[in-house]
Each structure stands twice: as structure tokens, then as C-alpha cells.
Image (cartoon, helix red, strand yellow):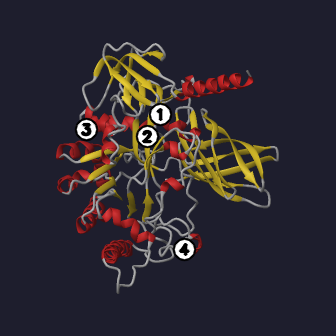
Amino acid sequence: MKFKLLLLAVAAIGLCGSIALGQSYAITNARIVTVSGSTIDRGTVVIRDGLIYAVGPNLQPPADVRVFDGNGLTVYPGFFDSLTTLGLQAATPRQGGPGGGGPSAASQQQSAPANSNYPAGLRPEDMTEDEIRTGEAQFESARNAGFTTALTVGRTGIMNGRSAVINLAGDNVSAMLLRSPAALHVSFATIPGQYPASLLGMFSATRQMFLDAQRLKELKRMYAADPKGMRRPEADRSLEALIPVLDREMPIVINANSETEIIRAINIAKEFNLRLIVAGGQEAGKVADRLKAIDAAVLLSLNFPKRTTAASADADPEPLDVLRFRAEVPKTAAKLAQAGVRFAFQSGGMTSLNDFTSNAAKSVENGLSQAAAVRAMTLAPAEIFGIADRTGSIEAGKIANLTVVRGDVLGKEKAITHVFVDGKLFEIKAPPPSARPAANGGNVNVANVAGNYSINVEIPGNPVTGTLAFIQQGAILSGTMQTTLGTAQIKDGKVTADGFEFSASVNVGEATVDIIVRGKVAGNQISGTIDSNQGTIPFSGTRNP
């Protein structure tokens, strides 16, 4: 009898587990923008076991699903940010001066693996998936802006390593990964304090690594064919990581914004017959024909240039070339589309993710079709990174990554209501009244605190420096606080009329201390206090340009 009861208990547990894993939903009476096909003016999407089970007009939802009435709502494929650092710990402050090289040369050498022949910043074998942190809370701001998927990679040094495409939910890294490695990433940067410390040296070092990788590839081929009488090729993780790029099995993403930088990227790709993807691409429209000729793609930044200082009667007029550049960048997407160049949108490090859809709308105002704009934030990046067979559009059998919007996603009056990531539902909390958009597109009674700040924390007898990275959505604040004590995620962040408040947990020795940070922002100056059970400490700092 006890054995029978045990079997029944096990069966019940298994059934409960099946229900938990296979939670099902149906969104009915909604407008459905499939992207890969025709828009359904009034239809139903059924989600089961993390996948899109069915989509179409006149569908009857299964009896076992949770039903949402989508009347007045539009369902889009989940937004895909095609170049981010989401999921990665904030980079440590640079110690080697300008140039994008990250830590000092000495610290790079100390951190080098014993079997690496190259310093940090020149290691294409580095895998982003090894650095991704788990925890869904870190993606809340991105999901609130409609994002379900992102390509993530560190952005320091010359060889930035190999990126990963992740879903913005999951209990562990394995559950988040969609493709890894996705691409090799390269920046026109330097390594301060050692070679290559100049752009000329960077090009020379990059070319030499590809030439050495070609030679290693040939030696390995010869040795595999007939090893007798031939010295075996030495193992080299860095050069071996370049071989799939040389074989066109993996694309290379080169960060380039200016016309000159993009032409240099094209020349490198042509010399070694690489599958080129340009990231940034602000002036890509000027060389669209060259990009099309080699079938290159562009991850186009929507972080449009804007005036960084307030205009005043006493201020000098901005140079004509600066004004022209600012006016031309929003036209780039339309120029790429007209030339037939594949492109996807990326956030480009913007401090407010609300700018993503707003600037996509500016691209439409400057000649891009609305359908192409939506495609550039959904299916296009999935196609570029070879995962369009599983995500990027609303089709039966694909991953249930969906963004539900009240209103037109490219319109001024819109609100994201629900996001599904891998079939998991995230209901977007309505912002407080002070954070709701005003008629002029701004926010009522909410300060603009978004950005990166360098701060000084006045600990008595032991002052420390650090950084604050604020991501703002209306009155909701997220991001990180980093000091010599480590990096802390901002929790329960909110923006007030003249400042902000958030909580965090920091490690002090072997203890974890909970803190509450309150501050004000005036122009580019920031100041406030850090409260804990140890007392109150003042801090101050400056917003970085």
C-alpha cells in the first residue's frame, strides 16, 4: 500500500512539473505582425512549451491555455538588440589612458592564460558565454523596452572575442544561449602601454595574426595528410580561433562608424575573404555600394548623435560638418535599404532604451519603410546571425519570443504590456504617473539622470573612486554601481523630480552590506549620500560625455 502511494506521489510530482514547464497561453483578437508574412489584422497566437504552437485568424484557443484578450493590442516578434554587453559584468576602469585598451599592460600580462601567446585585447579565442552572469533581474529594463533577445560581447581591446546570442530570461546560461559563438568581434582600438599602441600598429598586428592563422591552417592540413618527417605544428589557441573566420564559417564584426573606418574594414574583409559585418555604421550610407558588393551586413546603431551641451545666446555656433553629420545619420538606414544591404538595428550603448523605437521611427521619417524598420529590430538580426529558423518572426514552431504593444510600436503613443521570452510571460508594470509620457514626448516631473558617472566616495580615511551606470525608463532606474569593492546591481531604482534613489548590496571584506543611495543631478554634476548600518557617506561626481 505504501509503495502504491509512493508511486502516486511520484506521478503527481511529475505531472506538476510538466504543467510548470509547459505553461500555455493564447492571445486572441490581436493584430499580429508576423514580419515573415502578411500582418493578421485580427488573430490568435497560441504559446505552448516555450514555442509558438499556432498563429492565424479564426483560431479557437485550446481549453487548457490561459487566454489574454488582445483587443486593441499588436503582437510583434520580440525585439532583438544586435550588439550589447547585456549579461556581462561592467568593465573595470581603464588604467592605461585613452585608446580603448582596458586595463594596464602589466595587469593584462598577469591575467593572461599560461597557454596564450597574446596579451589581453588580442585573444580572439575569448568566449563571451564564459562571462555571462545568470539572473533575470538584470534584463528587466531591456524587457520593459520590448527586448527578448540580444547579441552580447565585451568591447575592450582589439580582438573583442567571440559573442553569444542570448534570450533575456533563463535560470542558467545554458537556458539563455541561442548561438555561441555567434561572431568574432574586432575594434579599431589600441593596447595602452605596449604594442600595438597605435592604430597603425593595430592594423599591422591584425593582418599578421590572420596571415599567421592562414599559415597554421595550411601546416595543420599538411600534417594531417602525412605527419611523417614533418615537425608537428605548435598549438595556438588564438590563431586557431581565427581559422573558422578564414573559412567563412563564422562572420567577423568590425566596429566602424566613419566612412574611413568602414572602408578599412571592407579592405580587411576583401584581403582575407571574410564574411564582414560592420557594427555602428553611422556613415555606412556613403559606402553602401561597396558593402553590397561583398555582401556585407551592418549592425546599425540607433544611438544617434545629438548636441551634448545646451544651446545659449553666448555659445559658439556648431561647425557645419557637425550639423550635417547629425542630420545625415538618421538617413543611413534608408540608404542601406535602397542599396540592398542587409542591416539590423542595435542600441549602440544608448543610456535610455526608450530612444531605440523613437530613433527607429526617425529612420522611417527619413525614408525607411515601416516594415523594414520593424524587420531590422526582429527578423533581420536573426537572419544575419543564422538563427532565423528558430526566432525573429511569428511562425508556428519558432521560439515564443513576443512583444505585445498597445498602439503602434513606432508611434509616439504606445505602451508595451507583455513580453514573452522562451514562452515565459513577463507582464510590464505600468510606470507611476510621474513617469508617464507627456504630450510633448517627455516625462512629467522626472529628472534626466541616464548616463555614466565617475564618482568619488568620501569614506573617512579611505576615499574610493567608482562609476555609476544609469539606465532610465521614465521613473524606473536600473544599472550598476562599481567601486574598488566590486560591482553591484541597482535594485528598486526610481527617479524623482531632481534626482534618484536605489538600493544595492556590496561586499565589504567577507560581509555583505545593504546600502541605500540617494542623490541629485544638476547638469552634469551628481552628488548624494550612501546610507548603511555603518552610517552615512557622501559622494559626488561628474557625468561622462
**CB atoms of marks 2 and 3 within 8 Å:** no
**Cα–Cα gap, marks 4 and 1:** 41 Å
Indicate the amino acid at tag 3: Asn
Q: Nearer the viewer, mark 1 or mark 3?
A: 1
Q: Which residue is mark 3?
A: 366
**CB atoms of marks 4 and 2 within 8 Å:** no
Residue found 41% across the figure and 14% down from its top = 61
Q: Which residue is mark 4?
A: 105
Q: Secondary structure at mark 1?
A: strand
Residue 61 lies, with reference to residue 2, above or below; the image says: above
Count the marks: how many?
Answer: 4
* Residue 479, percent from left and from top: 57, 44
Residue 476 lies, with reference to residue 307, above or below; the image says: above
* Residue 219, percent from left and from top: 33, 77
Checking the image for residue 468, the label placed there is none
**CB atoms of marks 1 and 2 within 8 Å:** yes
